[in-house]
Amino acid sequence: MLRLAVEWGALEVVPQIKLLPGERPGERVVTPEEEARYLSAASEPLASIASVLADTGLRPEECFRLSWDAVTWVNGRYGTLFVTHGKTAAARRVLPMTPRVRAILESHWERAGKAVESWIWPAPTPSGHVEVSSLRKQHTKAFEIIAERAAKNNQKPVRPFVLYSLRHTFLTWLGESGCDVWTLARIAGRSQIQISSRYVHPSEDAMFAAMSRLGGHKIGHSEKNEISENPNQRQLTQ
């Protein structure tokens, strides 16, 4: 909104907005248990969309705009998704499908009569596909069901999260798995690595492993090798 205001001349520059002391960003990492409880309480198509978000790191609006011609069933191990919608050129990318995403989309594809070009998530909206507004009631209802089940089973309720948190969760787990920041930025559909770098926190073991892979370049040379590679040093030693 602020960038648009600058574009329209209502503002000169985009102001920097910082969180107040004690505030936390709206996005958070969803635990596997919370994800499972949410998916079991969510109705369709929310449950399927949330599963795709959790397994691909797609932005919600990117997922909503997927059409069947963006799905390739034979690429990679389980097929790929071609993301065409985005604010930058980096948003256009090909993502591999996980077994869960493949199973969900295949099921929807068969129910859609093996469509070729229609929306994967059709809905009675002006755009013709699911939008945030059309999922809001299902999303709220899912947390109500979770709270009811938690009260009956003496469980801790799941703290509500937004759909974007599933993307944030996926990227966090990807960074913790050892994915480098360049690959993570590519999967996330970002043109710069600054934001993606917050997901990558190399451990001490990972740094040692990276250094050990340099063997044969600068690390791992013995004194004998260094002398034999330098004729002047070899003559001086003799």
Image (tube, rainbow, N blue to C red):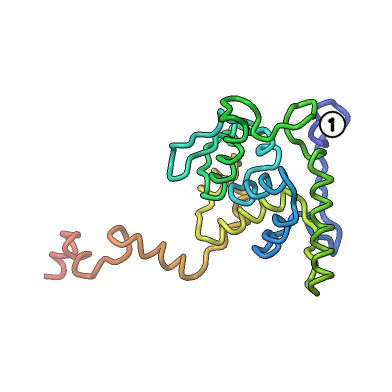
Indicate whether 79 appears above or below 161.
above
Pointer 1 residue: 5
Q: Nearer the viewer, residue 32 or 201?
A: 32
Q: Secondary structure at mark 1?
A: helix
Give residue 70's position: percent from left, percent from top.
56, 31
Give residue 142's position: percent from left, percent from top.
79, 54
Q: Name the residue: 67% across, 33% down.
A: 65
Give residue 95's position: percent from left, percent from top.
53, 41
Indicate whether 156 appears above or below 87.
below
Quarter of the image that includes the C terminus: bottom left
Q: Name the residue: 54% across, 34% down.
A: 71
Q: Is residue 214 shown left or right of residue 142?
A: left
Indicate whether 13 appears above or below 102.
above
Q: Nearer the viewer, residue 25 or 32?
A: 32
Give residue 177's position: percent from left, percent from top.
52, 60
Q: Name the residue: 83% across, 56% down.
A: 19
Q: Nearer the viewer, residue 176 or 162?
A: 162
Q: Is residue 29 shown left or right of residue 182?
A: right
Visible residue check, residue 192: no
Amino acid type, residue under disc 1 in the picture: Ala
Which quadrant of the figure has residue 35?
bottom right
Of all residues shown, which one is farthest toward the left? Answer: 238
Q: Is residue 75 shown left or right of residue 154?
A: left
Q: Is residue 45 shown left or right of residue 103?
A: right
